Each structure stands twice: as C-alpha cells, then as structure tokens.
Image (cartoon, grey):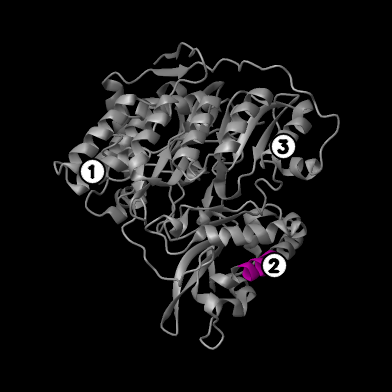
Amino acid sequence: MTVTHTPAPAVGRLGFARHEDVDLFVERLDAFERGELSADDWRGFRLLNGVYGQRQDGVMMIRAKLPAGIATPAQLRALADIADTHGGGKGHVTTRQNVQYHFVPTADVESALRTLADAGITTKEACGHSVRNWTCCPFAGVAAGEPFDPTPYVEALARHLLRGPYSSTLPRKLKPSLGGCCGTDCSQAFINDLGFLARTRDGAIGFQLLAGGGLSTLRRSALVVDEFVPAADLLDAADAVVRVFHRIGNRHNRAKARLKWAIDKLGAAAFIAEVAAERALIAAEGGTPLELPAPPPPPVRRPALPQATAAADGYAAWAADSVRPQKQPGFAAVVIRLVLGDITGAQLRALADVAVHHGEGEVRTTNEQNLVLRWVPTAKLPALHRELAAVGLARAGANSLADVTSCPGASSCKLAVTHSRGLASVLTEVLDARPDLVAAAKGLDIKVSGCPHGCGQHYIAGIGFQGGMRKVAGKPAPQYLVYVGGGIGAAGASFGRLVGKVPARKVAAALEKLLELYVSLAQASGRTGAGAWDGAPTEVLRATLGALTELAEADATPDDFIDLGTTAPFEVASGDGECAA
C-alpha cells in the first residue's frame, strides 16, 4: 500500500468537526421533545455526540474530543468561550486528553456544540459505545529516543475511524492510544482497548499492535497482537481490531462487554488469529491507503516581546519539574500544571497568545491532566515563566507527587461513590506544603477515583485511592481503598495491591505513613517509583496503615460522616452512570 500526503491546510490543523453533526443533534432533540424518539434512543444518540447527563437535573456534561490532545490557538479561544459562557468559568482536562465542561445548562448545549464546531472541535463519538478519543504522548516529535514522530499517524487513525461504519455501533466503548517513546508508555497503550507503539525494523517504520488493556473491576495489561505492523498497514490493522470487536463483543451484558472480556473468553491465540484473518479479508477487499496529514504551517510570529533580563521569583522551582529539554538543541517542552485538570477561560485565552509568542503555535493536553507547550527557545524560558505566572499557570511541581490526578467523582458523576476531587484537593494542599517529602518520594504519583471504574486511573498509580463506603453505627461514612505499586512501563502495565481501607478524614495521615515507608524502601533497594514497593510484603504495608484503617463508633466525629469537599451528610447516591453506558 502507498503512503500519500494530503495538502497542508491554509491555517493551523484541519479540524475534525462537521456542522451537520450539530444539525442532526438538534433534529433528534426536537424529535425527542415531540415524543417521536424514546428516552433510551435519545440517550444513546446524545452520548454518541459527547453529551452526558449528570447527577443534577437540568445540566449536562459536554466532552470536547481532542485527538492526540492537540489544540490550536483558535481552538483554545473557543474552549475559553465555552468555559465562560456555559461552563461556569472553567474547563477540565481529562485523563484521556479531552476537555470537559460540567454543569452546562441543557438549554445551552446547542450553542456550545456550535461554538466548538466553528473551531473544528468535534464531540462526535466522545462518549457512548464508540471508538473514543485517541491519546498520544504529548512529547511526540520532540522526545529523545523515539524512533519517529507518531503525531501524523494518530491524526490519520482518528480521522479514518471517526464516523466509520463500525465506530459508533460497538458492543461497548473502545479506548485507543498511539505513542512512540522508547522505554516508557507515555500514551498508556497498555491500558487501552487498542494501542499502537512506534517501532522500527530493518530501517522500516511501523508499530507494535496491542489490544485488550483496561482498568476497572477486571484489570488487564494489553495483549501483544502483532510485534510489527508496517506503517502502510496501520489503518487496516486498526480496522481489523474494531471489526473483530464489533462481531465478537458481548452485547447482552454491559458489565462484561469491553474488548478485554471478549479476549478472555475467546483466548489470546484465538483472538490473534481472528485479527489476522480480518486483516487478510480487508487486504483482499483492497484495504485503505494511509494518507498522512501534512504538518501544520509554522505559526505567524508576532513582534518579539521584551525578554526578561533575570529570572523571576519561583523560576528555579518551576523549571525543575516543568521544563524538559527537547531532542532539538536549543528548545524545550514546558509542562503547565493544572490543579485537578481545571483551567479558566481567561487562562485558555492567555495560552492561545503564549503558544504563538513562545511555542509552536499549539498546545497539547496530557493524561496527567496538564498541558504541554513545546518548541520554546530555551532563552525565552524566563519570559515564558513570567507570562504564565501572571495568569496563575506557573505552579511548580508538574508531574511530581504533589500533582494529583482525579476523576470528577460524585460532584457530577452518577456512578461515583465519593467526591474524589475533595480528597485530591486535600492531598494537593498537604503535599504542596511538604516539598521535602515530595522530593524524597520522587518517582511516585497519586491518582484518585470516586468508584471502582477507575477513571482517575488509581490502579496504575504509585499510590492510588478508590472511593468507597463503610457503615459506622448504622450510618454511611466515606472511605478510600488504598492501592500501592501500580504503573506502566515498556513491558506493560502493573496494577497496585490493595493494602487497606481508610476513612476519608484519615487518608492524608495514611499517605504520610506510606510515603515514609516508601522513602526507606527506596533508599534500601536503590529503586524508585512503583518498583520500590516490591520489597514490602502486603502485610507490612497493611501494618503501616495500622489503626488508621479503623473507625469505631465511640471515636467517630460528625466530620467522619461528611465527605471531603462537601458539607452535607454522606450518602451513597450512585446510579446508572452514563460513562458506563
């Protein structure tokens, strides 16, 4: 098969949106309101167009789909407009590199979708039983050690499968990923249903093909389906996995409908054979030539801004974690830390200008809920720091232990048990106040989820917390299940061990105990990160938590029955969450 290039777009990147998608959304909404479309049919259609229901009546969540996490300045300004007009002043970067808006009034949904479409941003297949957003390493193209830049390939995949014949009629959602860093898995391909990792063989470029990864109640590190798929066969290989899943996936039990369940039932060897047979069939049908998008034109640079003559206060601490040298000499990539993934409309607008003044003319989101600005001349770093600091985006500790990841939790999600953002906020404050502890525990990360589904990815965290409930004196009290030792590397994903269940108000103290143990383990073994936990038996970890796992009736206080981040008495009000729909 041949590999061809499409013409470069006149300005920026070619968008993924179609205005007719929004027109059809409005038509179906009108039909539902006239009683011509059932509630179930409307719900399924609405989800396939990136619009979720929330716990609260009268408001929705909208998910803007950003393949590879890429946003241009025009798109950043559109995202800012949505935040200010419909999203309560902020957007939220997710672990799948999307941008979400919560508490959008139902009456505002059409306007929000049209604003996004005008900027080339789609919500199509951002939710529902579809091929979801393609994640990619945010350092693709600038990371040392990568065999080649995978960015155009992930863009080609996203464009090829979007609105495809199978992509919105699957048995369950299919989360895809493509990355290229050697020795790591920045794109998290090993926990996705479909993953590709850039490889070379005998001078040729291609990808390792993975399938069946996932978190939730059945954790799986993805199966290696093919060690090397030539780049020209990339689209056909992806099509094959999607077709096989469409055919063999469980359509009767939603709880066991993800691809990993189908692979378990069929067996690894049989599944690999099914994919190979499907690829042969696709080839016999003529296949799909791989058309790579041309790179976007360089940004039109505005007049040079005055350069800071000296670094501002806080520059060194910020640069220690935020600045990453690129493989291109003289340039750096900068991680912008967003607390819990939140960013205001004003900050998004400021970034649109910063990306042009100092970077490549676009930004990328990350699966740690941050942003990355690339191609920053190293001489401009002090000036960049000043501009970011002026809009509250120069927080130190990016991707450190203090940079806690969290799902939205019970603040909006129907499935969540606890307000995970409440705990994440508390832990962030505790750790930001303890830079000594954060430095000593280098190599660890913390992730929080409000329920077992793991949208906060706590199963692959160095320390992960999962929301739960216990009864004390017959009353529900919030608690968190504690996992340690999870992570993703070049060989696959490892999932944390459950070492205890801690009442919500005691989690911060439990974290400090675990970090003290981690530091001693790392010093004794010479290992950092998730691997340092290997030297501690589960019994030792449980003993470390000790009495912190207990909550006797006689010792309970009124606060123990109130979830973190809330003021109302705790209750489990989880329902039919639409992220599982």
- Badge 1 density bin: few <14, some 14–19, many ≥20, Cα 10 Å: some
Q: In the figure, is residue 328 to the left or right of 573?
A: right
Q: In the figure, is residue 404 to the left or right of 481?
A: right
- Badge 2 density bin: few <14, some 14–19, many ≥20, Cα 10 Å: some
Which residue of the protein is positioned furthest toward the right in this rendering?
Answer: 310
Q: Residue at x 56, y 41 (%)?
A: 344
- Read off the residue under disc 2: 517
Q: Residue at x 48, y 14 (%)?
A: 9
Majority SS type along the magenta span: helix
In front of the other: 25 or 239: 25
**Bounds of the magenta segment:** 508-515
Whole-angstrom CA distance, mark 1 to mark 2, is 51 Å
Q: Is residue 420 visible?
A: yes
Q: Residue at x 26, y 34 (%)?
A: 26
Considering the numbered disc 3 on the image, is that residue within a helix, a strand or a loop? strand
Residue 314, image x, y percentages: 79, 44
Instruction: Examine the structure image and report whether residue 38 is included in the region drawn in magenta.
Output: no
Considering the numbered disc 1 on the image, is that residue within a helix, a strand or a loop? helix
> Which callout, 1 or 2, points to the residue nearer the camera?
1
